[in-house]
Amino acid sequence: EVQLVQSGAEVKKPGESLRISCQASGYSFTSYWISWVRQMPGKGLEWMGRIDPSDSYTPYSPSFQGHVTISADKSISTAYLQWSSLKASDTAMYYCARLGYRYGQPFAMDVWGQGTTVTVSS
Amino acid sequence: QSALTQPPSASGSPGQSVTISCSGTSSDVGAYDYVSWYQQHPGKAPKLMIYEVSKRPSGVPDRFSGSKSGNTASLTVSGLQAEDEADYYCSSYAGSNEVFGTGTKVTVL
Protein backbone atom coordinates (compact mmCIF):
# COMPACT_ATOMS: atom_id res chain seq x y z
CA GLU A 1 0.00 0.00 0.00
CA VAL A 2 1.31 3.42 -0.96
CA GLN A 3 1.26 5.73 2.02
CA LEU A 4 2.83 8.74 3.67
CA VAL A 5 2.97 8.65 7.47
CA GLN A 6 3.68 11.89 9.26
CA SER A 7 5.08 12.46 12.72
CA GLY A 8 2.83 13.32 15.63
CA ALA A 9 1.41 16.57 16.92
CA GLU A 10 3.82 19.12 18.35
CA VAL A 11 3.39 21.86 20.94
CA LYS A 12 6.23 24.38 21.01
CA LYS A 13 7.10 27.80 22.37
CA PRO A 14 7.97 30.81 20.19
CA GLY A 15 11.63 30.82 19.26
CA GLU A 16 12.04 27.06 19.51
CA SER A 17 13.16 24.89 16.61
CA LEU A 18 11.20 22.00 15.15
CA ARG A 19 11.48 19.30 12.52
CA ILE A 20 8.50 17.22 11.40
CA SER A 21 8.74 14.17 9.19
CA CYS A 22 6.91 12.34 6.42
CA GLN A 23 7.85 8.70 5.85
CA ALA A 24 6.98 7.13 2.51
CA SER A 25 6.30 3.47 1.86
CA GLY A 26 4.95 1.28 -0.91
CA TYR A 27 6.67 3.04 -3.81
CA SER A 28 10.08 4.23 -5.00
CA PHE A 29 10.76 7.32 -2.89
CA THR A 30 13.09 8.89 -5.45
CA SER A 31 10.58 8.57 -8.31
CA TYR A 32 8.20 11.24 -7.01
CA TRP A 33 8.52 14.71 -5.55
CA ILE A 34 7.24 15.48 -2.05
CA SER A 35 5.32 18.71 -1.44
CA TRP A 36 4.53 20.36 1.88
CA VAL A 37 1.22 22.16 2.36
CA ARG A 38 0.11 24.42 5.21
CA GLN A 39 -3.44 24.82 6.43
CA MET A 40 -3.94 27.42 9.14
CA PRO A 41 -6.96 26.98 11.43
CA GLY A 42 -10.16 27.51 9.47
CA LYS A 43 -8.25 28.54 6.35
CA GLY A 44 -7.35 27.15 2.94
CA LEU A 45 -4.45 25.15 1.58
CA GLU A 46 -1.12 26.86 0.89
CA TRP A 47 1.71 25.24 -1.07
CA MET A 48 5.00 25.74 0.78
CA GLY A 49 7.53 24.01 -1.41
CA ARG A 50 8.65 20.63 -2.64
CA ILE A 51 11.69 18.42 -2.83
CA ASP A 52 12.97 15.99 -5.42
CA PRO A 53 14.39 13.23 -3.21
CA SER A 54 16.66 12.03 -6.00
CA ASP A 55 18.75 15.20 -6.03
CA SER A 56 17.32 17.34 -3.20
CA TYR A 57 16.34 20.17 -5.58
CA THR A 58 13.94 22.26 -3.50
CA PRO A 59 11.89 25.13 -4.92
CA TYR A 60 9.97 27.12 -2.32
CA SER A 61 6.92 29.30 -2.52
CA PRO A 62 8.02 32.95 -2.21
CA SER A 63 5.76 33.16 0.85
CA PHE A 64 7.80 30.53 2.69
CA GLN A 65 11.31 31.00 1.27
CA GLY A 66 13.71 31.65 4.13
CA HIS A 67 11.18 30.71 6.82
CA VAL A 68 11.31 26.92 6.52
CA THR A 69 13.69 24.28 5.24
CA ILE A 70 12.62 21.18 3.34
CA SER A 71 14.97 18.21 3.20
CA ALA A 72 14.92 14.48 2.58
CA ASP A 73 16.86 11.35 3.53
CA LYS A 74 16.41 8.87 0.72
CA SER A 75 18.09 6.09 2.72
CA ILE A 76 15.03 6.00 4.98
CA SER A 77 12.44 7.33 2.48
CA THR A 78 11.66 10.31 4.68
CA ALA A 79 11.08 13.98 3.95
CA TYR A 80 11.32 16.74 6.53
CA LEU A 81 10.01 20.22 7.17
CA GLN A 82 11.87 22.29 9.71
CA TRP A 83 11.87 25.66 11.41
CA SER A 84 14.81 27.24 13.24
CA SER A 85 12.72 29.75 15.20
CA LEU A 86 8.99 29.19 15.46
CA LYS A 87 6.41 31.96 15.66
CA ALA A 88 2.84 31.85 16.90
CA SER A 89 1.76 32.39 13.30
CA ASP A 90 3.27 28.98 12.40
CA THR A 91 0.39 27.32 14.26
CA ALA A 92 -1.26 25.17 11.62
CA MET A 93 -1.80 21.71 10.19
CA TYR A 94 0.99 20.64 7.86
CA TYR A 95 0.53 18.01 5.18
CA CYS A 96 3.04 16.25 2.99
CA ALA A 97 1.89 14.95 -0.38
CA ARG A 98 3.41 12.90 -3.18
CA LEU A 99 3.66 14.75 -6.46
CA GLY A 100 4.17 12.86 -9.70
CA TYR A 101 6.11 14.39 -12.56
CA ARG A 102 7.38 11.57 -14.73
CA TYR A 103 5.71 10.17 -17.81
CA GLY A 104 2.83 7.93 -16.79
CA GLN A 105 2.50 9.51 -13.33
CA PRO A 106 -0.33 11.90 -12.54
CA PHE A 107 1.06 15.42 -12.32
CA ALA A 108 -0.75 16.06 -9.07
CA MET A 109 -0.58 15.45 -5.33
CA ASP A 110 -2.10 11.98 -5.42
CA VAL A 111 -1.15 10.61 -1.99
CA TRP A 112 -1.33 12.68 1.19
CA GLY A 113 -0.06 12.19 4.70
CA GLN A 114 -2.49 12.35 7.60
CA GLY A 115 -1.21 15.77 8.66
CA THR A 116 0.84 17.06 11.59
CA THR A 117 -0.62 19.67 13.90
CA VAL A 118 1.89 22.25 15.08
CA THR A 119 0.87 24.56 17.92
CA VAL A 120 3.16 27.43 18.89
CA SER A 121 2.20 29.19 22.09
CA SER A 122 3.93 30.77 25.02
CA GLN B 1 2.39 34.46 -6.23
CA SER B 2 -1.34 34.99 -5.69
CA ALA B 3 -3.82 32.26 -4.90
CA LEU B 4 -6.17 31.18 -7.65
CA THR B 5 -9.65 32.64 -7.26
CA GLN B 6 -12.60 30.40 -6.41
CA PRO B 7 -16.11 31.32 -5.26
CA PRO B 8 -16.39 30.94 -1.47
CA SER B 9 -19.47 28.76 -1.69
CA ALA B 10 -21.68 26.74 -4.00
CA SER B 11 -24.73 24.63 -3.36
CA GLY B 12 -27.24 22.32 -4.95
CA SER B 13 -29.93 19.83 -4.13
CA PRO B 14 -29.31 16.08 -4.31
CA GLY B 15 -29.21 14.98 -7.92
CA GLN B 16 -28.44 18.45 -9.26
CA SER B 17 -25.14 19.67 -10.67
CA VAL B 18 -22.78 22.28 -9.31
CA THR B 19 -19.85 23.90 -11.11
CA ILE B 20 -16.93 25.56 -9.36
CA SER B 21 -14.64 27.97 -11.19
CA CYS B 22 -10.93 28.50 -10.62
CA SER B 23 -9.50 31.69 -12.09
CA GLY B 24 -5.79 32.10 -12.58
CA THR B 25 -3.42 33.85 -14.93
CA SER B 26 -1.39 33.19 -18.06
CA SER B 27 1.48 32.15 -15.75
CA ASP B 28 -0.35 29.29 -14.08
CA VAL B 29 -3.77 27.95 -15.19
CA GLY B 30 -3.44 29.39 -18.68
CA ALA B 31 0.12 28.20 -19.18
CA TYR B 32 -0.09 24.53 -18.27
CA ASP B 33 -2.56 21.66 -18.46
CA TYR B 34 -1.62 20.75 -14.89
CA VAL B 35 -4.73 21.79 -13.00
CA SER B 36 -5.85 19.52 -10.17
CA TRP B 37 -8.88 19.49 -7.89
CA TYR B 38 -8.93 18.31 -4.29
CA GLN B 39 -11.81 17.45 -1.96
CA GLN B 40 -11.43 17.96 1.76
CA HIS B 41 -13.90 16.85 4.38
CA PRO B 42 -13.70 18.45 7.87
CA GLY B 43 -10.78 17.14 9.85
CA LYS B 44 -9.48 15.04 6.95
CA ALA B 45 -6.57 15.26 4.56
CA PRO B 46 -7.31 16.48 1.03
CA LYS B 47 -8.13 13.89 -1.63
CA LEU B 48 -7.24 14.15 -5.31
CA MET B 49 -10.38 14.22 -7.47
CA ILE B 50 -9.17 15.52 -10.86
CA TYR B 51 -5.69 15.88 -12.31
CA GLU B 52 -4.26 17.33 -15.53
CA VAL B 53 -7.47 19.36 -16.05
CA SER B 54 -9.88 16.51 -16.73
CA LYS B 55 -8.47 13.12 -15.71
CA ARG B 56 -9.96 11.13 -12.85
CA PRO B 57 -7.86 8.94 -10.55
CA SER B 58 -9.01 5.39 -10.09
CA GLY B 59 -11.91 5.20 -7.65
CA VAL B 60 -13.22 8.73 -8.20
CA PRO B 61 -16.82 8.62 -9.48
CA ASP B 62 -17.44 9.82 -13.02
CA ARG B 63 -19.85 12.37 -11.54
CA PHE B 64 -16.75 14.52 -11.12
CA SER B 65 -15.42 16.19 -14.25
CA GLY B 66 -12.98 18.97 -15.03
CA SER B 67 -12.34 21.39 -17.86
CA LYS B 68 -10.33 24.49 -18.72
CA SER B 69 -10.74 27.49 -20.95
CA GLY B 70 -8.01 30.08 -21.10
CA ASN B 71 -7.03 31.12 -17.58
CA THR B 72 -10.06 29.54 -15.91
CA ALA B 73 -10.56 25.93 -14.90
CA SER B 74 -13.81 24.38 -13.71
CA LEU B 75 -14.94 21.39 -11.68
CA THR B 76 -18.44 20.02 -12.20
CA VAL B 77 -20.11 17.64 -9.80
CA SER B 78 -23.13 16.02 -11.40
CA GLY B 79 -25.82 14.10 -9.56
CA LEU B 80 -24.91 15.66 -6.22
CA GLN B 81 -24.88 13.31 -3.26
CA ALA B 82 -24.77 14.06 0.45
CA GLU B 83 -21.17 12.84 0.69
CA ASP B 84 -20.07 15.47 -1.85
CA GLU B 85 -20.54 18.17 0.78
CA ALA B 86 -16.98 19.31 1.42
CA ASP B 87 -14.40 21.97 0.64
CA TYR B 88 -12.90 21.88 -2.84
CA TYR B 89 -9.57 23.38 -3.87
CA CYS B 90 -8.06 23.78 -7.30
CA SER B 91 -4.32 23.79 -7.82
CA SER B 92 -2.11 24.65 -10.77
CA TYR B 93 1.51 24.17 -11.67
CA ALA B 94 3.17 27.56 -12.12
CA GLY B 95 6.69 26.76 -13.28
CA SER B 96 8.63 25.11 -10.41
CA ASN B 97 5.90 26.17 -7.99
CA GLU B 98 2.36 25.07 -7.32
CA VAL B 99 -0.46 27.42 -6.35
CA PHE B 100 -3.76 26.54 -4.70
CA GLY B 101 -7.14 28.16 -5.09
CA THR B 102 -8.92 29.98 -2.30
CA GLY B 103 -11.32 27.10 -1.76
CA THR B 104 -15.04 26.56 -2.25
CA LYS B 105 -17.43 25.12 0.30
CA VAL B 106 -20.01 22.94 -1.43
CA THR B 107 -23.27 22.47 0.43
CA VAL B 108 -25.81 19.81 -0.50
CA LEU B 109 -29.19 21.31 0.36
Image (cartoon, helix red, strand yellow):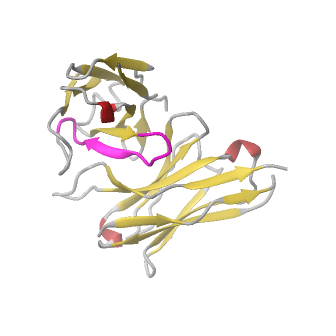
Q: Is residue B42 magenta?
A: yes
Residue at image location 36% in from the left, 37% down from the top = B91
Residues B107 and B33: in front is B107
Which residue is outermost to the bottom? Answer: A75
Magenta stretch encompasses residue B7: no
Quarter occupied by residue A97: bottom left
Picture coordinates of residue B19 (x, y %)?
Answer: 26, 20
Q: Position of residue B8 (x, y in %)?
A: 45, 20
In which quarter of the view is residue B40 placed?
top left
Main structural element of the magenta stretch: helix, strand or loop?
loop
- Left or right of B84? Residue A73 is right
x, y (%) of residue B109?
35, 19
Task: Give the extent of the magenta segment.
Answer: B41-54
Judge from the rendering whether residue A11 lies leftward or rightward of residue A19; answer left or right: right
At a point 46% along the width and 47% down the height, the residue shown is: B44
Q: Position of residue B85 (x, y in %)?
A: 36, 31
Q: How many marks?
A: 0
Residue B93 seen: no
Viewer can see residue A18 = yes
Q: Nearer the viewer, residue A122 or A70?
A: A122
